[in-house]
Image (tube, rainbow, N blue to C red):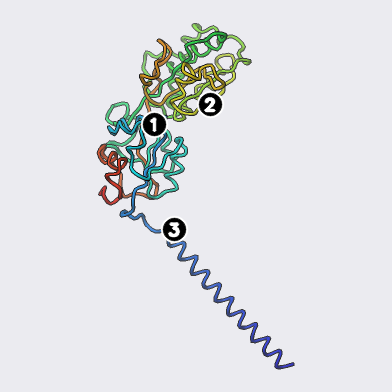
Amino acid sequence: MKKILTVFMTLMLFGLAACDSETTTTSQTATTTTSVTTDAFDETSNITVYTRDTTSGTRDAFFSGIEFDDAVADNSVLVTGYVEVDGNGSMISSVNNDIYGIGYISLSSLAESGLNGLSFEGVEATEANVLNETYGLKRPFNYMTRADWTGMETERQIVEAFVAYMTTVDGKATIQNRSGIVSIETEDPSWDDIKSQYPICESDNSEITIYFGGSTSVESVARALSQEFSAKCGNFVVEHNHTGSGDAYKRTQGSEADGANKLHIGFASRAFKDTEPGATDTYGFICFDAVVVVVNGENTSITNLTKEDVKKIYDGTTDSWSDLG
């Protein structure tokens, strides 16, 4: 019996020792893993290039701004291994999750993105520098309304009033609050100054739905303006469906203007193209936005890029962070 007890105790001690050994090993492994995930940025690593899809107004402004016009609508000229994302939010998420990533976003999204925004040609991306025309990567926010309002007379009048509202001191203040870049001039009217010209806003419009859409980059500005203006114009119902700048024309005056996705007013974060021939007096300018080249928040190896630097990254001539030193 004593012999059996001795053997049992020996096995227990051996098991405890083994458990201690496993605990130590696990702890060492965890420490090693932590060390790997907190390694410093390696400048010799390859650059991961992120871009927007070919219908994006942000993409158009970006590639036009770096004089890489061939890439505006053609992925075949981009560096091998590029990653395409479908929106401003997707771009932010992707570069945030890739320490070696580079991309481009709207200036209005930069402050809350967690990304590092780079200067362009030695000029910081700020609203002041856009307005004084020293920052080169900027683009217009534009709108387009329907041309055919058959059976939609009330909607036409509301949209006409909305377009006028965007040019008032009130509207411009809202645009600025949503990071749209626009100057408020002393001669700009207030809404109270001009609202009598739009009697539709004295009616109860709570049964009328106005459809807004187009650019995802303009969405924040458009939502703020529409919600604010609804209360000033009979509480019309606001519905937004933002799917990209290419749909601003397509769904107001183009191939989908009378389809299920039709819009009353669409927005583009770029100039309208020759292939988007809006009817006279149905489109115009809202404000400016800037496009900012961005890198992961852990990447502090570079703070400024030239037009040539950026083009070489996107066409594959420059593929390593160390080549930018």
Whole-angstrom CA distance, mark 3 to mark 2, is: 39 Å
Kind of residue at disc 3: Thr
Q: In this view, does 193 lie above or below 268?
A: above
Graded by Cα atoms within 10 Å as few (under 14), some (14 to 19) or many (20 or more), the crowding at tag 2 reads some
Q: Quadrant of residue 18?
A: bottom right
Graded by Cα atoms within 10 Å as few (under 14), some (14 to 19) or many (20 or more), the crowding at tag 3 reads few
Kind of residue at disc 1: Thr
Whole-angstrom CA distance, mark 1 to mark 2, is: 18 Å
Q: Which badge, 1 or 3, comes first in the chain's sequence?
A: 3
In this view, which residue lies farthest toward the right? 1
Q: Left or right: 203 with respect to 34?
A: right
Q: Residue 131, image x and y in percent?
A: 32, 26
Query: What element does badge 2 sit on?
Result: strand
Q: Kindly identify the residue that appears in the image at 57 percent across and 21 percent down.
A: 260
Residue marked by disc 2: 241
Q: Kindly identify the residue that appears in the image at 59 percent across and 14 percent down.
A: 234
Looking at the rendered structure, which numbered label has been put on residue 37? 3
Graded by Cα atoms within 10 Å as few (under 14), some (14 to 19) or many (20 or more), the crowding at tag 1 reads many
Q: Residue 111, image x and y in percent?
A: 42, 38
Nearest to the observer: residue 128 or residue 299 = 299
Q: Left or right: 176 with respect to 130?
A: right
Quadrant where the N terminus is found in the figure: bottom right
Q: Which badge, 3 or 2, comes first in the chain's sequence?
A: 3
Residue marked by disc 1: 58
Query: What element does badge 3 sit on?
Result: helix
In this view, which residue lies farthest toward the front? 76
Q: Residue 277, image x and y in percent?
A: 39, 15
Q: Kindly identify the residue that appears in the image at 53 percent across and 12 percent down.
A: 158
